[in-house]
Structures are given as structure tokens and as C-alpha cells.
Image (tube, rainbow, N blue to C red):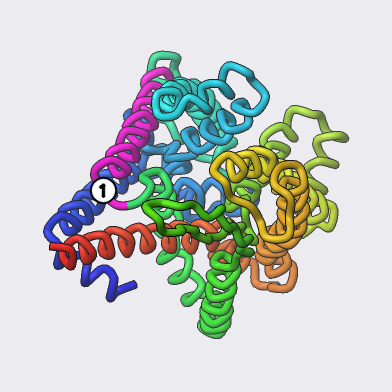
Amino acid sequence: MLTVLTRAFRVPELRRKLLFTLGMIGLFRLGQVMPAPGVDVVAVRECVGSASGGLFDMAQMLSGGAMLQLSVFALGVMPYITASIVMQLLAVTVPRLERLRKEGQEGQAKITQYTRYLTVGLSLLNAGTVVALARAGQLLPGCARPLLRDDGLLAVTVIVVTMVAGACVVMWLGEQITDRGIGNGMSILMFTQVVAVFPSYMSKIFVLSPASFVVMLVAGLFLVAAVVFVEQAQRRIPVQYAKRMVGGRTYGSSTYIPLKVNQAGIVPVIFTSSLLYLPTVVSPMLGDEAGGWVARNLTTGTHPLYMTVYVLMIVAFAYFYVSITFNPVEVADGLRRYGGFVPGMRPGRATAAYLAFVLSRLTASGALYLGALALLPLVAFAILRDPGTQQNFPFGGTSVLIMVGVGLDTVKQIEAQLQQRNYEGFLK
């Protein structure tokens, strides 16, 4: 990776794109540490340093620590990511959106605009929930100090508007990185959020237990290597195209359809984690008996029921997401339209059935892989008896998947642009 970056910085155009991306990341991090108006910064810092568990850990990781600090960019990229997932799901069920998806670039531009509108709506909902929890003293567990200097309607409205505006700016930063920088902008910003909390986690573990720090570091390296191996694994379906006579010569070509083992990516883990942290928010509203049962069984990561539901939801959503993002019938029709075929398979329905069969088996392996990876930190929490090490465990399945996936995709894009420029120079 360092070699690729070194080569990229030698190309003036790529150097400008990389520097632009780094500048946008710097602005993003600045907004994440800048407190919103009306927030008691001293109280927030004291409470964040002593809080842990459940909703706290998830929000701390996915927002880079910004949400619980009530900063300007407290919502981070999650509203846009959630809106994108929802629009992908709606594009399969809503006929108008499905037609727009098939219209090419113009239809995709309209879907992007709808995604922006939905992002604003989700940002308003998320900001209102975060500020309401902070106002009621339930945002940070065990915090007795008020986090807001003024809990009046006007002050709360200003904070909510500031956070919604910050989410819109984050969305703009991601789009600017995609257009003028390197890689997918929102993915890089999410990568930044996850990596931002790693140094503090690792330093706390080292202070608490140097032996645990060494063991966790070695285990983390093996975990990252295993994730890289699985993320790169794919099943290649061979495809051949019919031979054609052009100018007295016979032309034919062969290629393949790459089907990844983890075809669903990080989406099932993020979506399931978000759904399973809802009980933490609603349990105080269910009364003593029902709320107590929910708090004991569905908000503790070390409970067997929580682990079972977590894995089953990841597997189910992985199958569902793959089914809506890869349509074997459309792929088979496209191959037949352009004269391609899978060796040994009839074009059309037989090819679609074969692709569906292969995809189903790959999805089974990928879904179990995602479930095991997401379950790993929960099992580690149950094994580790040191509560300080538990609350600072950094190698969660979601964080590792985000870091590895975004890192590999960005490096591939840089290498592709380097190869393109090398070929252009060779032709000249």
C-alpha cells in the first residue's frame, strides 16, 4: 500500500486528488471535535470518559466519538448511509424508483436527489433523538451532570438545526471526495470515523493491561489478515462470447463473472447493529417488567439470546440484500443479448438458475462469515473478565470490515488510475 501511495504522489494529477481528499478529511475531523452551541464541553468530556456499554460503544465507534460529544458533525455519515440503504430497498419494491434505476445516469441522478432529501429527514429525526436524550440525562450512562447549558426550546432547536446542517455538510464533503478526490467519499469518511477512535482505545488497553494489549494486537493482525483473505475471495463464472467474422477474420472472447464470497459487504452488519440497539433506547419506556426483560436479554452483548438474534438477523439480511442487488435473471438476459453464454449451460433460464444456485451457496458462506465476524467481539467480551479491557475492545467485526473493505477499494482505485496513466504513456 505504501508503494502504491508513493507512486501515486509522483503523478501530479493523482497527487492533487490525494491532497484534496486529505483536506476534506481534515475538515471532517474538525467538525467532529467542534462542539455544537449550547453544549457544556467540560461536562461532556467528564461523562464520556467514564461511560461504556451497549448503545454508547456502538455510537462511539460509528460516529468517531462525535455523537456523544454533541459536536457539529455529531451525526456523521450514518444518516446518508441509512438513506442509501433504504433507497436501494425501495428501488426493488417501488415501480417508479425501479424505472428510474434502469434509466441510466439521468435516473440515478434523481435517485441521488431523493437520497439527499431522505438524509435530511433522517438527520432531523436522529438529531432530535440525540438532543432529547441529552436533555433528559439518558445519552451517557451514569452521567449526573447536565450536558446542555440551557434546555429551553430555543436552545434545543439551535442544537438540532446545527446537527442537521452538519449532516448536510458531511454529505457534501463525501460527494466532493467522490467527484474530485480518490475513492468513494462516504466510505472514506466512515473509514475515518472508525480509525479515529482506535488510538484512544489501544492506549487505554495498554494502560490497563500491557499483556492484554499485546495479545489483542496480535489477534487483531491475524483477524485483519483473515478478513482481507475472505474479502478478496471470489467465484469466477466463465463466460464465452460467440465468434464473429470481421474482415475475413474470426473474433471471439472469453471473460468471467466475479461473484464475491461476501457479496453483501458491510451492509448487513451495520443494519442489524442499528436495529438491535433500538431496544436500549425503548426499554425505559416499556415499564419495569417488560423493560427489565428487554434490558437483561436484548441490550447485553454477552447474553446468549442477544448473540443468537444478532447472528440470525445478519444471515437473513445478507440473503435479502444480495437478492435485491444481484438479479440472476437480468444477468442471464444480458449475456444472451450480447451473445455470451456460460460453458455447459443453455442461455436464458438455465443460466439464470445456475447463477442463482452458485450465488445461494456463496451467500451462505458469506453470511456465516459475517455472523462469525460480528460475534467475535461479543465472545471476547464474555471471555475477558477485565471490564476495562471489555469496554475498550477495538477489533469489532463492524470496525474491521469497514477498515479492510474501504482500504482495499481505495487502493484498487489508485492502482487502476496508475495503470491507466502508464498505458497512456506507453501508447504515446
Outermost residue on the top side: it is 154
Describe residue 310's horizontal placement relative to residue 107 as left or right.
right
Q: Position of residue 82 (x, y in %)?
A: 54, 35
Q: Is residue 4 above or below residue 63?
A: below
Q: Secondary structure at mark 1?
A: loop
Residue density around tag 1, few if under 14, some if 14–19, many if 20 or more, within 10 Å: many
Q: Is residue 160 visible?
A: no
Q: x, y (%) of residue 89?
A: 63, 31
The part of the image, by quadrant, that contains residue 274 is: top right
The residue located at (32%, 32%) in the rendering is 169
Q: Residue furthest right?
A: 289
Compared with 173, 257 (above or below) is below
Quadrant where the N terminus sits is bottom left
Looking at the picture, tell me which residue is in the foreground, 359 or 380. 359
Residue drawn at point x = 58 percent, y = 40 percent: 334
- Most foreground residue, 234 or 425: 425
Quadrant for the C terminus in the image: bottom left
Q: Is residue 167 magenta?
A: yes
The magenta span reads 157-182
59 to the left or right of 300: left
**What residue is shown at x 43% (from left), y 48% (from top)?**
187
124 in the magenta segment: no
Q: In percent of the image, x 44 and y 17: which residue is there? A: 152
Q: Is residue 16 above or below residue 99?
A: below
Residue denoted by label 1: 181
135 lies above or below 65: above
Image position, residue 413 (x, y; %): 35, 57
* Image quadrant where residue 311 sits: bottom right
